[in-house]
Amino acid sequence: MSDDQRRSRSYDPEVFLLAFAGLVLEIAYTRIVSFKLFYYHTYLVIGLAMLGMGFGGAVVAVAPRLAAPARIMGPVATLGALGTAAAYALVARIELSVLDFASNPASPFALVAVCALVFVGFGAIGVLLSSVFAAAPERMPRAYLADLGGAALGCAAAAPCVSLLGAPATVMVGAAAMAAAGIRPWWAVAPARAVAAVVATGALGVLAARPALLPAIVPDPVKTMHPKHLAGAPPLFSAWSPVFRIDVTPSVGEHSDVLVIHHDGLWGSTLHRWDGAPASLAPFDHDERALPFRALARPPGAVVVIGAAGGHEILAALRFGSAHVDGVELNPATVDLVRRRFADFVGHVAEHPAVRLVNDEGRSWLSRQSGPFDVVYFVAPDSYAAMNSATSGAFVLSESYLYTVEMIGETLARLAPDGFLAMQFGEDDFDAQPNRTLRYVTSARAALRRRGVADPGAHIAVATTRSLGDVSTILVSPTPIAGARARAFAAAAADVPNTRVRWLPGEPAPPGPLAAVLTLADDALGAWLAARPFDVSPVRDDAPFFWHFGRAGSFFGLDRHAGPGIMWEASGAGERVLMATLVAAILFAAGSLALPMAIAAPWPTAAIGRATVAGYFATLGVGFMLFEVALIQKLALVLGYPTYSLSVTLMALLVAAGFGSLASERWTGAVDRLAPRLALAVVALAALYAFGLDAIAPAVLPAPLSARVVVALAVTAPLGFVLGVFLPLGVSCIARKVPDPAPVVAWAWATNGFCSVIGSVATAILAMTFGFRVVLGLAAATYLAAIVLLRRLAR
């Protein structure tokens, strides 16, 4: 095959497979890292995936001879796939504790080794994609369509693969797709060698189909699923899901009637043996779960349990005479435990005539109900395990729409006049730092103010129960808590060992932070909140980061407060990982772009400025991520189940962007005429997402899922189409002006990849600090700057 034939050949199928492999690997590794380490370390996976794309572009820019996919596709794809499989085996077995960096000098090196191994597959994919794009930039619109299409399919397929095969096997699926990308090109130049790619594809496919052949993952020693905590006993059941991995183990000690459900390697909830007899539920009379029900001062009618998990709170509701209980649980694997796998153990509670167990997202399900309910019971429905759209594979922003001012208001609107919203979660030490309680109470206060309540403190009651830490129970009612209900709450608290009433309307409360947030005037409360070392201000839908207690300095490690327990250790940890990822991306970009281009590969043309190319493709990388991440997170509220937000939103965005790329072919010579239309579209869409989605979400939440999916597609597709036009237009401008465009195109692709990392991390930081509206405004501004630079490229 001649050089001309090789350069004119289409590699769209290979680009499709490589993009598919990249997305599948990324999503699989976010789940693996969440289980092995902690949820916020998935930021590293996202960064490594995008750095791989940038790294590939930098390598091809420095060594333009690699812009020869016919020559390198077969061997690099095959070796990269095998390297990816071997790297997983090492990642799984490396023991790493991220909480003892200060005391164990080996731990940071172990984390670096894990990152380097995860990077292997992404780096190989980045080199191959850059080789194709640089070799034939005139084909960029169609090649970019294949790239986005493969990524869209990977996005859609990854979550089902994780559920059916497990995250480790999903890594093998991605590796097999990578190896398959080498078969056709290698066959064209060396048929005998193509056998290696075929064998590699088949072997990796076998590993994907037989997950038991893969090495088991050793989690962080602090996690309850580490072998040292299991005393040699294997789990009774394990399953991966897009939400989190679950493992069921016997309880340690004498609690033979309790099984522990671990969420991503950490103790999460329990399954309790029940013989089906009402009398055997008597222990709930002296349990903190009695508080929401006994405080009613009458038998509860309709009850909702959000975060039903193993069904323990459902049993408590039955104990206190609830006429009907709806248990809503997000994770399908957990629902399966109660309905099927351990149904005998829990007394077939899901089949009880008064119980309905639902697999759904709590807010979405509740919005479709009219009520009235006597108790809506939130049982720590979130935790530090990754339980949002990002855990399904995209960008972990530790948001939860279950805790916001708007959600509290929606719940109060569905309660009976004397009903209760009950929120229950753990505090490491309430007296030392009641961050979660304070933040939820301030949010409840704001929600009550929205309802016109002059004295929110009269509608709230709080108690804590000392257990492993403190379990905080917060009750919020549409009407003042007084008379029989106040007395019933106090009596119930007195019957539960180690329980203290912290706030009860009409009763004297000791001075402290809880009394401050419930008694201070609005202006005084604002000043008091601003002076707190941690941010416990109300959480709203525009920035639903309930668990983000750190202030701006937490991203730089400037406001870390020493204290006991994991709650203190966790404060700011995710923010510091974000900042470390950002710094690493900037340093990697500087080393991979500036230094090699200055030393090894001088700028090849005077027809187009390096600063213009860098600025244009950098703004595309940052701007696309600002739009993408914000839109995925905001549509999580519309679609409900987190996996849908990722798969529907991102897939629609990528597919529509692919069609935008294809359409860009006809506008290559009409940039000046197109630019104003692009600017108008970007601004209009950003305004729609920033302000219109807030009105759309409440209107469509009660609709069936199919209708909400249609709405999400209609909202997302126009943006995808518009954004898909930009990158191939820029590449086409370079191809027209530069005699040998390969190194410039590769360098542009590298710039885009590196800046995508910066954009994704910046989105997380900006959203946590300012909210999604600011992020969307910055996204629009970034693309307006890109339009200015595009006109320079065209001229």
Image (spheres, rainbow, N blue to C red):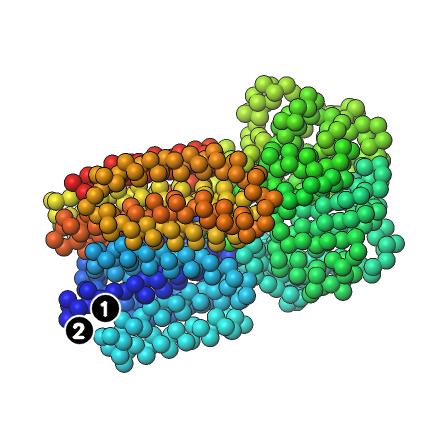
| Label 2 residue SS | loop
Residue type, label 1: Ala
- Location of the N terminus by quadrant is bottom left
Depth order, front residue of 683/161: 683
Vertical arrangement, residue 546 with respect to residue 3, above or below = above
Residue on which the image places disc 1: 70
- Location of the C terminus by quadrant is top left
Q: Earlier in the sequence, mark 2 or mark 1?
A: 2
| Residue 639 visible at all | yes
Vertical arrangement, residue 299 with respect to residue 455, above or below = below
Q: How crowded is mark 1: few (under 14 residues within 10 Å), some or many (20 or more)?
A: many
CA–CA distance between discs 2 and 1? Answer: 9 Å
**x then y, percent, for residue 621:** 33, 45
Depth order, front residue of 422/105: 422
Q: Which residue lies furthest to the right in this view?
A: 279
Which numbered disc, 2 or 1, marks the residue closer to the eye? 2
Residue at 45 percent across and 67 percent down: it is 172
**x then y, percent, for residue 326:** 72, 49
Residue type, label 2: Met
| Label 1 residue SS | helix
Vertical arrangement, residue 665 with respect to residue 174, above or below = above
| Dot 2 and dot 1 residues touching (CB under 8 Å) | yes
Disc sitting over residue 378 in the figure: none
Q: Quadrant of residue 68?
A: bottom left
Residue at 54 percent across and 47 percent down: it is 708
Q: Residue 62 vs residue 122: left or right?
A: left
Q: Residue 671 vs residue 546: left or right?
A: left
Residue at 41 percent across and 48 percent down: it is 717
**x then y, percent, for residue 164:** 55, 66
Residue at 77 percent across and 44 percent down: it is 302
Residue on which the image places disc 2: 1
Depth order, front residue of 343/672: 672
